[in-house]
Amino acid sequence: MALAGRCHDRRRRERGRRTRRLPALDHAATAMTAAAPIPHQKGTHMNTIRVGVNGYGVIGKRVADAVLLQSDMDLVGVADIATDWRIKSAANRLPVFASTIEAQQAMRGADVPAQGVLDDLLAQCDVVVDTTPKHVAAGNLERYRALGVKAVLQGGESHSTTGHSFVAQANYASAIGRDSTRVVSCNTTSIVRILGALDAAGLLLRARGVLIRRATDPWESHLGGIMNTMVPEPTIPSHQGPDAQTVLPGLDVVTIAAKGAHTQTHSHYWTLQLTREATRDEVLDALHAAPRIAFIRMSDGLVALNSTVELMRDLGRPRGDMWEVAVWEDLVTVNGSEAYLAYQVYNEAIVVPETIDAIRALTGTVPDAATSIRLTDESLGMRQDFLTPAEEPDHDR
């Protein structure tokens, strides 16, 4: 046990020397909470991408704020049908549009200063990010295409709707120049990041995972959700494994999922068959080499989902968001050609950086995944270790 402890301490020291950590979130938090309205400046420079967001809910508001942080993007505005506190708070600082004629009339009655309807927003956009409820975006897609506006949809839509599903580190290149793509769901995104990293290192043969999902989003937990029980998904495999195969077709993966009675974040537990006998260090090195994977440790007191959520708040993250997959480093176990690990997925935020990269891929303004990922991650202040001092980004890389 003493030897294991010394090896663990050595790994933490080496990681601190060799990883390039990104800046803290003070600048992002400031930009995302500014009260003054933000006017749209069309074409700040020749490569600026004009972006609209249709649907200002859990994902849409986060995407809008992330777009504001990108030096190569302009946020034209956001559209929705709501007239309550959600859209009123947005109207204090963003251009707001009504998604329908009926919504425009309702907004007038609620004193929401709508600047037009959805078509008025689309007329100014190169790309629209549709974060409307499940299946609504599929009905909007032909409208976007008819207007010549590229579209990024979310994981609630089927793969067949766009014919392309997206995770930046896995298949950015195949999205370049397309008229639309679909950023996969929060759980699928995490699966592709983790299993994709091991597959890229030549270590992964097959993966079997159990997912414990949150019951509902925190903001609407007063409306419904299960209590004092757990509800298995009705089929095995659950949908997340096949969904991951839309991004990584050769992935041998089976998922089993259940919905728990909590409202904050998902958790995953994986048994991995490796291609050969490997060491724990080899598995960790493969995960460290991939973007958007962070490491947490029970030895630091991060022993449950709520403790990581609280850490994000203490770090000053906007809305307490965690865009990274948080792997419990001290739980990673390797036994010959088998590996076992557990991680946490912040379902409200993990797809946001992927969505920003999808915007660049569709427009072709950034031709490679690594550059887009770096730009996005630096703008958000993403980290590989939350408890080590942040370093300034290396802009020469």
Image (cartoon, rainbow, N blue to C red):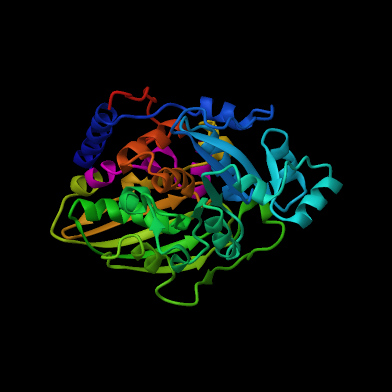
Q: Residue 132 lies in what quarter of the image? A: bottom right
Look at the image and tell me whether residue 384 can be seen: no
Look at the image and tell me whether residue 36 can be seen: yes
Q: Quadrant of the N terminus?
A: top left
Relative to the observer, which residue lies in front, 341 or 368?
A: 368
The magenta stretch spans residue 75: no
**Most extreme residue toward the right, as rendered?**
109
Q: Is residue 29 above or below residue 199?
A: above
Left or right of 41? Residue 322 is: left
Residue at 58% x, 26% y is: 30
Q: Is residue 33 above or below residue 160?
A: above
Residue at 36% x, 48% y is: 168
**Most extreme residue toward the bottom, as rendered?**
235
Q: Residue 23 lies in what quarter of the image? A: top left
Left or right of 112? Residue 43 is: left
Residue at 22% x, 52% y is: 200
Q: Quadrant of the C terminus?
A: top left
Residue at 28% x, 41% y is: 288
Residue 211 location in percent, x, y?
Answer: 43, 62
Q: Residue 29 lies in what quarter of the image? A: top right
Residue stretch in magenta:
285-311
